[in-house]
Amino acid sequence: METLKLRLADDDRSELTLGVGVHAVGPIDGRDGRLGLIEDAQAARVRFCVDRRGVWLTVADGARGVHVNGREVQRMAMLRVGDAVYVDGVEMRVVGGEPPELPGAALNEAASDATGDPRVVLRGVGGQYHGRSFTLEHPRLVGRSSEADIRIDDPTFADRHARLDLVGDRIILRDLGSAEGTMVNGEPMRDALLRPGDQVVFDAHHRFVVEAPMRGRSAREDMQESQVDIDAGHGQALPAQPASPWRLPWLLLAALVIAGLLALLLLFGSG
């Protein structure tokens, strides 16, 4: 699983590593209004639970004013990379261990006139376009201009903020001269090479997630996965038992015997 970090927006130097396990976040002694990782779980405002499924936020009993991407959370919420969490007025962002990849000069200059895969979409998960999806088989312009495909009607937003291109199987975010850039997985970026699952935020409120069909898995990968069982208590891989070639015939024989006994019972029982 990718290493994740929790970045406190009020202190650029403060990054809390979120390894697998439970991380309690609360007031730090001697630092007025500052939050950080604490050992006393009872004093925590929130807990970040990290496992192979992802990151879960749980709110402590009695805690109020906890928000994820501007929405209040009272008990629990599942997080994705790039989400903004507000606790006691302090903003935290879930970021990856490495910043998003840059497209490089060759891809950044590549044209995308050819029609791409319409199954590659930018799905709105917050803001004005929540619930809407934009296919990326053609370039998509983001800006305040009336010609923009994703129009952000804000006086401070650039007419031509950025463009999204699908070049082959690569999704490229190109900045068109905006003042503040774009947030990609919680990181401020100008240009970026996007991958399925990445979260893109325009103007702090308009959130989108990149979605694309999963690449095909080989039969070998499927077989290897089916032959490994993880013991949740010890974290050890247990070899799968080989299937017996006699299992199916024995089941059929048992079913025939049971059916015969039921027939005899009905025959002699009725007499």
Image (cartoon, rainbow, N blue to C red):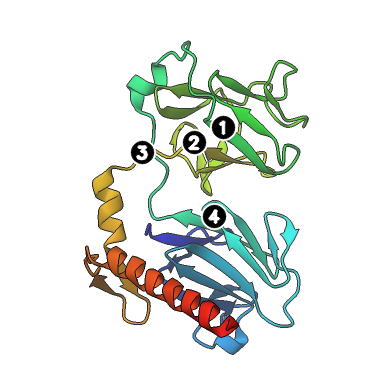
User: Residue 183 appears at what percent x and percent y?
Assistant: 56, 42
Q: Considering the numbered disc 2 on the image, is that residue within a helix, a strand or a loop?
A: loop
Which mark is first along the chain, 2 or 1? 1
Report crowding for label 3: few under 14, some 14 to 19, many 20 or more residues within 10 A (C-alpha).
few
Residue drawn at (48%, 10%), measured in percent from left and top? 113
Which one is in front in this view, the residue at disc 3 or the one at disc 1?
Answer: 3
- Judged from this view, the residue extending furthest toward the top is 113
Along the horizontal axis of the image, is 52 left or right of 72?
left
Please tell me in which quadrant of the rendered image residue 134 appears.
Answer: top right
Amino acid at dot 1? Val
Which mark is first along the chain, 4 or 3? 4
- Judged from this view, the residue extending furthest toward the front is 271
Which mark is first along the chain, 4 or 2? 4
Q: Dots 1 and 2: beta carbons under 8 Å?
A: yes
Q: Dots 1 and 4: beta carbons under 8 Å?
A: no
State the separation of the CA atoms marked 2 and 4.
16 Å
- Residue hosting label 4: 80
Q: Considering the numbered disc 3 on the image, is that residue within a helix, a strand or a loop?
A: loop
User: Residue 137 appears at what percent x and percent y?
Assistant: 53, 21
Along the horizontal axis of the image, is 270 left or right of 196?
right
Amino acid at dot 4? Arg
State the separation of the CA atoms marked 3 and 1.
18 Å
Amino acid at dot 3? Gly
Q: Dots 2 and 3: beta carbons under 8 Å?
A: no
Q: Which mark is residue 166?
A: none
Q: Which mark is residue 212?
A: 2
Please tell me in which quadrant of the rendered image residue 151 appears.
Answer: top right
Residue drawn at (59%, 62%), measured in percent from left and top? 78
Q: Which mark is residue 121?
A: 1
Residue drawn at (62%, 26%), measured in percent from left and top? 161
Amino acid at dot 2? Ala
- Residue hosting label 3: 216
